[in-house]
Image (spheres, rainbow, N blue to C red):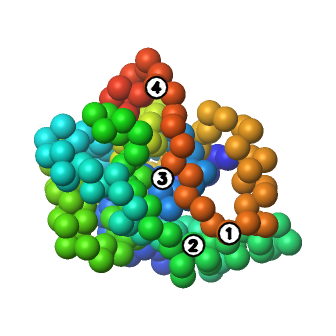
Amino acid sequence: MVHDIAPIQGHEKEQLGSGSGEELTWHVEDAFHPFRGDYLGMLCLRNPDQVPTTFAPVDVSALDASTVRLLFEPHYTIRPDNSHLRKNRVCQADEELAAAHDRIDEMATKPEKVPVLFGSPEAPYCRLDPYFMDPPESAEAREALDRLIRTIDAQLQNVVLDAGEFCFIDNFRGVHGRRPFRARYDGTDRWLKRINITRDLRRLAVVAALARVPAAAVNGPRPLISSRAASDGYGRLS
């Protein structure tokens, strides 16, 4: 699925790709969802103001073992981000879409506790969206999450895409966001094409069945791949 990413008037202060005036805080794309995409691709069509995309790899090598252990435990809740709310849909709802929104509502009102790290403790996968996360009940779990957030903050870098450049991010190994900017709404603002990519289309059959079962977080093992996207979490083509 390909989305156009450009500022929309009235969304300036929103945590949306169509926002502008506020920092779009870093996150894993659709972190709340058990079937989020494996990779995120962005093609820049226009960026005359050199608005940076932010990126950081998820590197836990500086964290102690007890902190990492807590992050692997289901202490954390992640609610759907605003782009998935009914008020932001852009088409008329049919039965299937209405059922999907019902499930999103369930995830928003009754979020399951999930780990934010999974896979290998040495090179874990990540499921994280701090802006839409509630503080964990446990003080130890809160401190572990704070340490992870500070670690990622320290690694956050600006990536300025020019027209014709691509950015590919491993959505299980890296986080991304966007710096604030002043939009003009005159047809010359930053414009990206964004695509979510899945490695396993068979999961779509499971997604179709989700409307008939309770929400469940799926954190199964994922095979390692020998690519720059897997090792660094980020790749760029021009």
Earlier-in-chain disc, 4 versus 2: 2
Horizontal side of residue 74 vs 201, given as left or right: left
Marks 4/1: CA–CA distance: 29 Å
Within 10 Å of disc 2 (Cα), the crowding (few <14, some 14-19, many 20+) is many
Kind of residue at disc 4: Leu
Kind of residue at disc 2: Met
Q: From where the camera sits, is residue 209 visible?
A: yes
Identify the residue under disc 4. Answer: 224
In the image, 44 versus 148, the foreground residue is 148
Earlier-in-chain disc, 4 versus 3: 3
Q: Secondary structure at mark 4?
A: loop
Q: Residue at 51% across / 57% down in the picture? A: 30
- Above or below, 148 against 199 in this view is below
Q: Residue at 77% across / 72% down in the picture? A: 99
Identify the residue under disc 1. Answer: 214
Q: Nearer the viewer, mark 1 or mark 3?
A: 1
Circles 4 and 3: CB atoms closer than 8 Å: no
Looking at the rendering, in which quadrant would you find the C terminus?
top left
Kind of residue at disc 1: Pro
- Looking at the picture, how far across and down is residue 147, in whole percent? 17, 57
Q: Which mark is residue 64?
A: none
Q: From where the camera sits, is residue 162 visible?
A: no
Identify the residue under disc 3. Answer: 29
- Looking at the picture, how far across and down is residue 185, in whole percent? 48, 65
Horizontal side of residue 77 vs 100, given as left or right: left
